[in-house]
Amino acid sequence: MKIYYSSRFVKAYKQLPKKIKDEAEKKEKIFRKNPRDIRLKTHKLTGKLKDFWAFSINYQYRILFEFKEKDVIWFHTVGTHEIY
C-alpha cells in the first residue's frame, strides 16, 4: 500500500501536539496492515465529503483520507472533528 500526504495534511500534522503525533504514527502502522481494523473506527463520510473516509487517532483526533486506486491512498488532513 502506498500512502501519499497532501500539503494540507503535512501542515496540519506539524501543528499537532507531540502526544497526538506519536499516537497517529501507531495508528498509521495499524492502517497500513488493515485500513478497516476495528481499532481505527474507519468510516465512510457523507454529504459533501461522501468520497472520503476517516479513521480515529483517539477520541478527539481523526485522519481524513481517500482511496484513490488499488493500494493507493491519500491522507488529506488531520485534526479534531472540526475537519469535517
Image (cartoon, grey):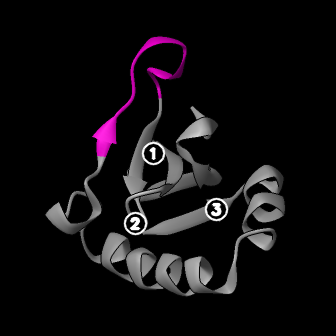
Helix, strand or loop at label 1? It is strand
Residues at marks 3 and 2, CA–CA distance in whole angstroms: 21 Å
Q: Secondary structure at mark 2?
A: loop
Q: Name the mark nearer the viewer: 1 or 3.
A: 3
Q: Earlier in the sequence, mark 3 or mark 2?
A: 3
**Amino acid carrying mark 2 in the image:** Asn
Judged left or right of residue 56, residue 48 is: right
Residue visible at 51% across and 76% down in the picture: 24
Q: What crowding class fits label 1: few (fewer than 14 Cα within 10 Å), some (14-19), or many (20 or more)?
A: few
Residue ID for mark 2 = 58
| 28 versus 8 height, above or below | below
* Pointer 2 local density, CA inside 10 Å: few below 14, some 14–19, many at least 20: some
**Between marks 1 and 2 in the image, the one whose residue lies nearer the viewer:** 2
- Distance from disc 1 to disc 2, alpha carbons, whole Å, reads 27 Å
Side of 63 relative to 13 (left or right): left
The quarter in which the C terminus is drawn is: top right
Q: Which mark is residue 4?
A: 3
Of the numbered discs 1 and 3, the one sitting upstream in the chain is: 3
Q: Amino acid at mark 3?
A: Tyr
What is the spatial separation of the Cα atoms under label 1 and label 3, in whole angstroms?
A: 12 Å
Membership of 28 in magenta stretch: no
Res 83 label: none
- Give the magenta-colored segment's residue range: 43-51
Q: Is residue 36 above or below residue 17?
A: above
Left or right, residue 13 beside residue 46? right
Q: Amino acid at mark 1?
A: Glu
The residue shown at (22%, 57%) is 36
* Farthest residue, direction left: 38
Asked where in the image residue 9 lies, by quadrant, the reply is: bottom right
Q: Tell me: 20 left or right of 31.
A: right
